[in-house]
Amino acid sequence: MSAAPAYSEDKGGSAGPGEPEYGHDPASGGIFSSDYKRHDDLKEMLDTNKDSLKLEAMKRIVAMIARGKNASDLFPAVVKNVACKNIEVKKLVYVYLVRYAEEQQDLALLSISTFQRGLKDPNQLIRASALRVLSSIRVPIIVPIMMLAIKEAASDMSPYVRKTAAHAIPKLYSLDSDQKDQLIEVIEKLLADKTTLVAGSVVMAFEEVCPERIDLIHKNYRKLCNLLIDVEEWGQVVIISMLTRYARTQFLSPTQNESLLEESPEKAFYGSEEDDAKAPGSEAEAAAALPARKPYIMDPDHRLLLRNTKPLLQSRSAAVVMAVAQLYFHLAPKAEVGVIAKALVRLLRSHSEVQYVVLQNVATMSIKRRGMFEPYLKSFYIRSTDPTQIKILKLEVLTNLANETNIPTVLREFQTYIRSMDKDFVAATIQAIGRCATNIGRVRDTCLNGLVQLLSNRDELVVAESVVVIKKLLQMQPAQHGEIIKHLAKLTDNIQVPMARASILWLIGEYCEHVPRIAPDVLRKMAKSFTAEEDIVKLQTINLAAKLYLTNSKQTKLLTQYVLSLAKYDQNYDIRDRARFTRQLIVPSEQGGALSRHAKKLFLAPKPAPVLESSFKDRDHFQLGSLSHLLNAKATGYQELPDWPDEAPDPSVRNVEEEDLSLTETHVDLLGECTEVPEWTKCSNREKRKEKEKPFYSDSEGESGPTESADSEPESESESDSKSSSESGSGESSSESDNEDQDEDEEKGRGSESEQSEEEGEKKTKKRKAVLEGHGEGSSSDEDSNSSSSSSDSAMTSESEEEQVASASWRKKVPPSSKSTPAAKEISLLDLEDFTPSSVQPVSPPMVMSTSLAADLEGLTLTDSSLVPSLLSPVSCVGKQELLHRVAGEGLAVDYAFSRQPFSGDPHMVSVHIYFSNSSETPIKELHMGTPKLPAGISIHEFPKIESLAPGESATAVMGINFCDSTQAANFQLCTQTRQFYVSIQPPVGELVAPVFMSENEFKKEQGKLTGMNEITEKLTLPETCRSDHIVVQKVTTTANLGRVPCGTSDEYRFAGRTLTSGSLVLLTLDARAAGAAQLTVNSEKMVIGTMLVKDVIQALTQ
């Protein structure tokens, strides 16, 4: 083009006079990194007669819109070109008008005749764009024109234009709801469309305009189920959501008879002996009541929906998988719901936002259907890189899945979490331990003893949360735990967290008869500090005084009067009111009412123990996957999930005339491939019926009922683990071995249905033999596997065959695992076991735990093995540095690396991995540390002694060094039986900090406190190789052990950490600007650390 240089030159960051300067994103290229000239220049280009200049101007304008720059003042110049003959210019003009037609309605109205002419344009893109612009003009006066345009577009030959018509329907309805009846007619017409491109859009219009008109869906139900696999992902989500509500109104509940046959799993699991004794009678009653209800037979259309949505569990879209999961949870028989667990656990490998939504739903499901997630317990273990909200949700799921079988594993996992740096997470872990102790009586004492040990923890928040949980556990059996109450009473001098202090006071007051000597003394101490306490503590102090007055008035009468007098003049009116009420109730007086005689019953009444329940217990009344479920509150536009009907509505309303079925079947062969038909008219009726006289599904097919694959489902899940395959896309490219598993699942429980489809399966197998030849894997086919393995619309090309053969040969080369698994193990997207290369031995946390911490958590340890420091198996650490060369060490080579893991012996120490290697020909014995001579403040936690290191052998140990927030070298001796070697370790400044997780608001708040002398700022220029988000974050976090802080802007990076020794905050901000210019800011009380950190980070970024 002749005008190409007009927008590709002068790529500097300068802006015109009076305009703000916009920074350029270094990751974007082409027109998005151009420097735009003044709008006058664009107006001149739009007014010329040259199409090339007009096209150039429109490209620049659309680029401005994409960058978020306001281009509304160009509307008059652009709208004049709506009648341009050049098709490319016209497309871009319509893109612009869709964006600004609503803001510039008057000017858009002037061109309404042009838009109407555009509706008749031969190009389908122009017709669709004209309709889109027309529906974007929010002026009531053109409603009749819009309605006429939508009706015409609904009959258009192009499915793309019909799809646009469906999108325009909700816009017109929101502008004028009186047009509802006419719009419903259009929706009814479009629902009958047999094109996958239109299906999702028209269902969305149906949901927006008339979701109550369920009768419009009857005739189209089976067609929508069959088209579902080929609809785009956005449309699949909408259709599945609508069909879920439809099925709840048209079919009977598949679990209606299960309530008579089995009790709730919680009662059956934790039932007492008395319940077991009553069980035979209850079973007899259930057996007597069962004949009164008709046996459940699943409607064939209900089975059709479940069967056609199952392949979508392999979709690449998390939204589609979530939609199918909620459909199965709400509609499927109990025995079949388990298939969704594997797909949901696969989504836990996605981004944190996806994980958050999935875990919210899994937490709800795991309360009612705990069994289906138990095999994947390890998938919910928490990683150190998980955000706090993800950690807490995983904790919720782990707690829900805990039972008497896996509770030792779960508690050992919780024991590790208590050492986390994330305080909110630690508090949630302690609450989870409390819930486990409540639900599983066998470990109650173990958990309680472990929580009591945590009371000696250095962290006040950990102690406070432990007190609150201990209070709830003690209410269950207070008589047995008098010593624990005494121990808690002694903590009132140290604990400052209000909720913890209040909990201790409540416990002492409630069970004061167990501690008759200590309780009055606690009241005396609280009376001394009453005026300085928080309101919640004051209220519990008043309660304690009242209870002691009623049980031990001889010792506490004066103290009680003193506390009530102080409370009488408190600033808080709640406390004043409580004091007056309590005085009148407990102190007898001449005017005292009848209540004072019953004060003891009021204050010391037996109270039921609190029930520690999951916060997700009652969330299942919202539809899973919905915004309302996520927020636990009804959102605007939310539609309640209907209750199951008592009697099934007439299924004949879904019967379709023979002509309609045969019309599509004439074009569809057995493999679902269309012949001699334009691509947009293809239908996804995957199988021809052998006889057109048969109904949609034979009666025998629906008789499988809830027993289908009931027993075989767990087995098939484990089989698919060992035979799973790589899948991508919504049901595309799944391997033949996976299809074999799906076929076996279906055929095991299908019963009479398998007989019906046997002949069809043989025909399909013959047709597919040519494609599958050479793969070495046989495949029995049915409707599920056929729909999930075939491509959505088109036949397999020779190119796709080559890819399949290549993938098959790749699978044959996979080396066998070290375990006794089948040799040809395949890796699948749905293979959810976390796998680790067998050559890497992970570091086991108990191996590095100190004896003091082991004592703290001894109550939570369910094994008898003592926890002592010992040698570690080799780990791979990056950034190894030489500590002792093998020549200087006479064959002993020593390297070290900073592992960036918390050192269990002392959280203020830096964890250093030491790697020993013997390259001599003689064994090295008694390898240990000599007595170090260290500067003031620096201390070392020695590694365990290595008795012998054979020739060619290597060993790894961990030592801790407290550098006292300085980069001074730690000098010490490495000693063997015969020699001593002087070595030193000097830390980079980035290793003196530990990452901190905080929100954007917390970061800004703390940064505001660290200004002036505590702020170091330097400017730098980022090289082109270091301008992407990934590279910047990687280089900063490699240089310094900091945690990433979320940021609302794309060109700013924030990191936070705390120094290990003093706990001082270190906040780092990198502001990337145009042309690679950047500004680095470090805020910290430790100015020396801040200065050195700035220097190191700049050096890393500019290399």
Image (tube, helix red, strand yellow):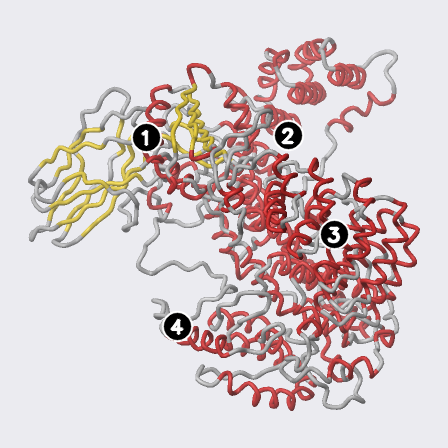
Q: Quadrant of the C terminus?
A: top left
Disc marking residue 83: 3
Sequence-wise first label, 1 or 4: 4
Sequence-wise first label, 4 or 2: 2
Disc marking residue 272: none
Disc marking residue 1096: 1
Specify whether 809 is left or right of 203.
left
- Tally of numbered discs: 4
The amino acid sitting under disc 2 is: Tyr
Sequence-wise first label, 1 or 3: 3
What's the CA distance linking mark 3 and mark 2? Answer: 87 Å
What's the CA distance linking mark 4 and mark 2? Answer: 69 Å
Query: Looking at the rendering, which quadrant does residue 232 occupy?
Result: bottom right
Look at the numbered disc 3 and give the secondary structure of its residue: helix
Q: Are the residues at dot 4 and dot 2 in contact (C-beta closer than 8 Å)? A: no
Camera-nearest label, 4 or 2:
4
Q: Residue tagged by mark 4?
A: 810
- Residue shown at 54%/26% (left/top)? 1004
Camera-nearest label, 1 or 3:
3
Q: Is residue 572 visible?
A: yes
Sequence-wise first label, 1 or 2: 2
Please identify the residue farthest to the front as the structure is shown.
49
The amino acid sitting under disc 1 is: Asp
Find residue 425 and report its horizontal and vertical position in percent.
53, 38
Q: Residue tagged by mark 2?
A: 511
